[in-house]
Amino acid sequence: MASVEIRFFGRFVIAHEMVGGVLTGKVTFLAPDMTAGKFARHVPVMSIPRAAVSRAQGETTLAPTYRVVTPGAPAEAELFVWDLTGCNVRVVSSGGLHLEFEDPIASLELLEKKVGRTPTFDKNNIGAGRLVNAAIQIAGGQGSATAAFSNSVDFLTLTDAMDGNPNNDVILHHEEPAADLVQIFLAGGTRVMEIIKGGVKYLVTVRLESSTSTSVSFTNLCSCIPQVERYDFEFGQYYEVLQAAYPDRLIPIVSHLGDAADCDMMTQITYEA
């Protein structure tokens, strides 16, 4: 049977919808505007192999922003790439997303609990807007979160990280390994992405032959060459999607990761619809 893999990598807040304290299976991947925290601009993009994108009448109504070729024969290696800045995307699916964490993704609930707080997600941030560059919703499939890079991460408060003395860092939480890649598998050879851009709905359709598969990748990364720094200050921007964000929010120490230290660590939170 044909299948489509949905991949997420980069700076995302995974927002799990709940009703009456019960998960509904609807999950939204939020791409925060990192420039709001005076960090490098991160661009949310969707990339799909050219051969998988349907060109039938009315099935794909939004042209790609870029076309690039990865290593290999162009017939298989060309990608269509869409800049999703300002877009709300719905991966048309149903039945609820079942997401298993082979490796943990630190939740904002857990991190805030370490400093004695119970966070509340600001539902004004569930779509693209002032603090969120793009939102991708999915409500079906079987998924997993894994560590693409081998890593273990310690967390400390932002105020501790900014005091200029790494010798007195106080570790308040540890994750090992920390997941940075989410993969979701959807059965069937046809998959539609509904994209709301500028108030207009567009479609991008994946259509496959039987017994074939492809990937639809969503990333939210900056264009900087990764530099090894001790602290992941960008992680602190995630807390801005909450109703209240405090200076002593927890951020990771990443200097020991070497070249693997990049803007790829996600977080997650639950919210009442």
Image (cartoon, rainbow, N blue to C red):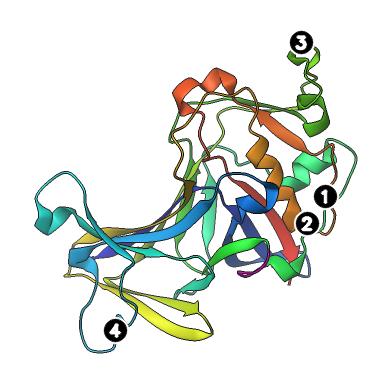
Q: Which mark is residue 242?
A: 2
As helix, strand or loop, the secondary structure at mark 4 comes to loop
Spatial separation of the CA atoms under disc 3 and disc 4: 58 Å
Q: Looking at the figure, which quarter contains the C terminus?
A: bottom right
Which is closer to the viewer, label 3 or label 4? 3
Q: Which of the 4 image quadrants contains residue 271?
A: bottom right
Residue 115 seen in this snapshot? yes
* Residue underneath mark 4: 59
Q: Mark 2 vs mark 4: which is more N-terminal?
A: 4
> Residue placed at 31% from the left, 69% from the top?
64
Assess whether mark 4 and mark 2 are in contact (beta carbons under 8 angstroms). no
- The 10 Å Cα crowd at callout 1, few under 14, some 14 to 19, many 20 or more, is some
Q: Amino acid at mark 3?
A: Asn
Q: Indicate the quadrant containing the N terminus: top left, top right, bottom left or bottom right.
A: bottom left
Judging depth in this view, the residue of 207 and 36 nearest the camera is 36
- Boundaries of the magenta span: 126-130
Residue that label 1 marks: 245
Residue 93: percent from left, percent from top? 45, 74
Instruction: Choose mark 2 or mark 3, whichever is in front.
Output: 3
Magenta-span inclusion, residue 154: no
Give the alpha-carbon distance from disc 4 to disc 1, as whole Å: 42 Å
